[in-house]
């Protein structure tokens, strides 16, 4: 069945009065548009939109219960019941809009589908979040709102500092809850990355997973004092409780902290392969050395860690550590610590292009940098819950710009190698331990 959609025609008041078949209500609305036209295009479009909305609601109620003032016959489903006002999300504010009411023959209120669709406040909440994350202060939201015209402005609300703040908090509480409850059951995860972000002298550990097709997904955060074993274990255990499947093997990319490695082993056991971030290792070794020597050693380490042959890479790293033993023993010790885990991804045959993402924590640090930029706009922190909300906001903001990792087409071969290696160890642990020795 074809439905007629009301059409608004712009005309002068005297011309509108002469148009055949044009309802009086529209004539009045068009008269109001003259002032809106003088206030600019957006104000004119806003007034026109509200006029169209009124006609849509009138048309829907007429279609459902019949024309206004018609007699209540046996075929009539209900009756008109005056008008009422309600809030409508419009141009970054709530505007009080009048709408027609109707009741069924049994006296129940008729809910208009048109009103339900346009009165939803999800868009307003999203707009508040967008502006807050873009750095617009709560007291400046009205300044950046669309110019909808003085007539509509007089009926608007929800633009005060406190109102904007409440909407943002409510929206981010929901976003945080959704992030922490995000089911991982349907994700075919190959890699999990864990790192920390410090906010107001408190560390929040965050997690990012990479699926077998190279898709990056932020999955959780856990607040603590430092990146200690307890905090990281709680985060990883929560991921498992939400459906993270690591039975076929999983690569865990960490920054090299001993607490992270211990937590990975505790939660994932021998199903996990740990890849320590080569960039963090280079940075740590360099910090133990004089400036000029540090630059030279860093370049050598970059070449060593890029060596596709694991045995050659390990041998070169050990020889470099031996060179540093006499004059810089702490730098040598830093290099040796967890050295084998610098080459885990290489040992699994990762391609050079894919290695750029799986031998370091760049993927998660990119997300953290956006979260850090987001939290940097806050001048006063109230509590840990507020910190988690803002960090979650940054993580979700980063997710919007995520693309699959470079080299994702090589992921199937890498995943197959990871699973073969996991199967080998879990089936014959003693034999593997002997070979590794």
Image: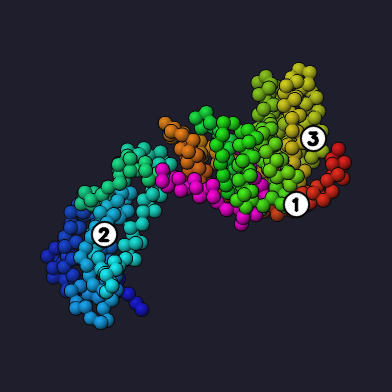
Q: Is residue 320 magenta?
A: no
Between discs 1 and 3, the one toward the N terminus? 3
The residue that disc 1 covers is: 419
Question: Secondary structure beneath disc 3?
Answer: helix
Name the residue rendered at 51%, 32% in the picture.
Answer: 199
Residue placed furthest toward the top: 327
Labels 1 & 3 near each other (Cβ < 8 A):
no
- Give the residues in magenta: 169-195
**Is residue 190 shown in magenta?**
yes
Which labelled disc corresponds to residue 306?
A: none
* Residue shown at 58% from the left, 49% from the top: 217
> Within 10 angstroms of label 3, few (less than 14), some, or many (20 or more) residues?
many
Q: Quadrant of the C terminus?
A: top right
Counting from the top left corner in percent of width and height, residue 45 is at: 27, 56
According to the image, label 2 marks what residue?
50
Crowdedness of circle 2 by 10 Å Cα count: few (<14), some, many (20+)?
Answer: some
* Residue 159 picture location, percent across and down: 30, 44
Determine the image quadrant of residue 279. top right
Q: Secondary structure at mark 1?
A: helix
Q: Earlier in the sequence, mark 3 or mark 2?
A: 2
Residue 10 in sight: no
Q: Which residue is mark 3?
A: 314
Q: Is residue 33 left or right of residue 289?
A: left
Q: Position of residue 169 (x, y in %)?
A: 41, 43
Secondary structure of the residue carrying numbered label 2: helix
């Amino acid at each position: 069945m074809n439905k007629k959609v009301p059409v608004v025609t712009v005309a002068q008041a005297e011309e509108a009065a002469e148009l055949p078949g044009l309802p009086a209500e529209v004539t009045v609305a068009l008269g109001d548009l003259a002032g809106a036209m003088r206030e600019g295009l957006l104000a004119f479009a806003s007034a026109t939109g509200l006029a169209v909305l009124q006609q849509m609601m009138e048309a829907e109620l007429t279609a459902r219960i019949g024309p206004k003032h018609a007699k209540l016959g046996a075929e009539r489903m209900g009756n008109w019941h005056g008008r009422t006002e309600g809030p409508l999300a419009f141009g970054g504010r709530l505007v009080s809009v009048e709408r027609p009411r109707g009741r069924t023959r049994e006296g129940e209120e008729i809910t208009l589908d048109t009103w339900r669709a346009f009165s939803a406040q999800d868009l307003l909440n999203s707009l508040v979040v967008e502006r807050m994350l873009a750095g617009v202060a709560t007291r400046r939201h009205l300044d950046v709102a669309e110019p909808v015209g003085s007539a509509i402005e007089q009926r608007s609300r929800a633009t005060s500092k406190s109102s904007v703040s409440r909407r943002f908090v409510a929206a981010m509480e929901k976003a945080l809850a959704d992030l922490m409850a995000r089911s991982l059951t349907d994700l075919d995860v190959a890699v999990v990355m864990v790192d920390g972000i410090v906010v107001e002298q408190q560390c929040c550990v965050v997690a990012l997973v990479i699926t077998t097709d190279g898709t990056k997904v932020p999955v959780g955060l856990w607040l603590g004092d430092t990146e200690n074993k307890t905090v990281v274990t709680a985060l990883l255990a929560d991921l498992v409780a939400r459906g993270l499947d690591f039975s076929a093997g999983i690569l865990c990319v960490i920054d090299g902290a001993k607490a992270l490695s211990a937590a990975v082993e505790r939660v994932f056991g021998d199903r996990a392969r740990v890849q320590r971030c080569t960039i963090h290792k280079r940075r740590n070794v360099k910090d133990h050395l004089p400036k000029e020597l540090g630059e030279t050693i860093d370049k050598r380490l970059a070449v060593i860690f890029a060596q596709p042959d694991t045995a050659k890479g390990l041998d070169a790293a050990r020889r470099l550590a031996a060179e540093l033993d006499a004059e810089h023993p702490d730098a040598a010790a830093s290099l040796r610590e967890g050295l084998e885990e610098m080459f885990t991804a290489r040992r699994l045959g990762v391609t050079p292009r894919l290695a750029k993402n799986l031998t370091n924590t760049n993927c998660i640090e990119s997300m953290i940098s956006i979260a850090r930029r987001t939290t940097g706009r806050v001048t006063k922190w109230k509590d840990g819950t507020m910190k988690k909300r803002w960090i979650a906001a940054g993580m979700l903001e980063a997710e919007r710009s995520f693309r699959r990792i470079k080299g994702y087409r090589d992921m199937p071969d890498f995943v197959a190698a990871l699973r073969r290696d996991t199967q080998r160890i879990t089936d014959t642990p003693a034999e593997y331990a002997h070979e590794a020795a």
